[in-house]
Image (cartoon, coloured by chain):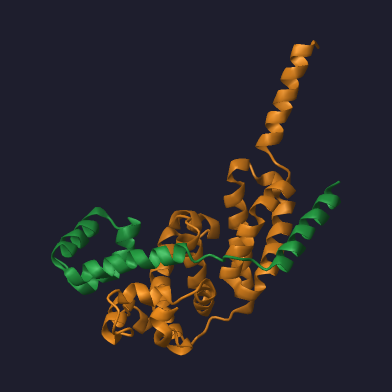
Chain colours: A green, B orange
Amino acid sequence: MIGCHEAVRQLWEYIDGTLDTADHERIDEHLGRCRRCCGELEFAHELRGFLRHGRDASLPEDSLERLYRTLDALEEQEQ
Amino acid sequence: MGPVADVEADSVDQACAEARPSFKTLAREHLPRLLSLARRMVGGDAEDAVQDCLLKAFRKYDQLEDPEAGGAWLTSILVNCCRDRGRVRSRQPAAIDLEDVEEFSLYRKIALEDPFPYSDSLHLDFLAGFGSEDLREVLLRLPELYRIPLVVVYMDGYLARELADMLQVPLGTVLARLHRGRKLFERTLWEYAEETGLLREGVQR
């Protein structure tokens, strides 16, 4: 059996599915009897969602414009 | 050649053209995504990093075998351009304490400090205080060694294995950086919230 410390340390790997079967089962077993670590797990899911949805809503138009012009210039160079 | 053969030849040509877009077409399609990714990986250097990426990709476009993989191919080139920029600048803050960070749990920190005493969803309220600019700022505070894996894997959804291929490092190296990066990210979220007053504003935002 593992303690909270060990379980929390591996939670994201647990979610990612990058743990081997034995480690994965140890976390399952721990989560089955530890409420606080279930809270940690839920929060880990929330943090991941937060990162996934945290991409820029808007981009600097002037940067994009200059980059599009670079592409035009590369195309002309090719012809 | 009869008309039937001509029609066939045309459709074959057309199929090839569809399978392999011009470099400009491919790059245009991905440009906003690349700029967004670069902004999170290298902040103010983003436009230059994307320029580097476009020039490099243009020069070796004939090496792209599978046009379907064009997006991942461009991402891979960009990730390396961003990493190279980070190296040149070498602004790895020596002050970051990596020993302590292993023990940090944002979940526990929020529960202990209880920043919003009247809330019954403390942890969600904490995250809700961060706008996308705040998040970008937090990411940019992390050393680029850890920031790039977090951005590429957790924001853009690439697999750790794919990132290992892009950077040409072993999978274990990427996994270790992701692990440490997450811990640093959690701690930096807390520090940023404390410094900028997000904790005080809390639920109103």
User: What x and y, as percent, mark residue B106?
Assistant: 33, 78
Q: Residue at x 62, y 69 (%)?
A: B84
Relative vertical location of residue B148 with respect to residue B90 in this rendering, above or below: above
Quadrant for residue A28, please give it: bottom left
Residue A51 in view of the camera: yes
Quarter of the figure with residue A22: bottom left
Measuring 77% from the left and 55% from the top, which residue is drawn there? A71
Name the residue rendered at 64%, 64% in the picture.
B81
User: Residue A26 versus residue B60: which sits nearer the camera?
Assistant: A26
Q: Is residue B108 above or below residue A13?
A: below
Residue at the spot x=71%, y=63% of the render?
A64
Percent x, y of residue B182: 40, 71
Can I make out residue B80 in this image?
no
Q: State left or right for residue A28 relative to residue B97.
A: left
Residue toward you, B155 or A10:
B155
Q: Position of residue B124 (x, y in %)?
A: 35, 72
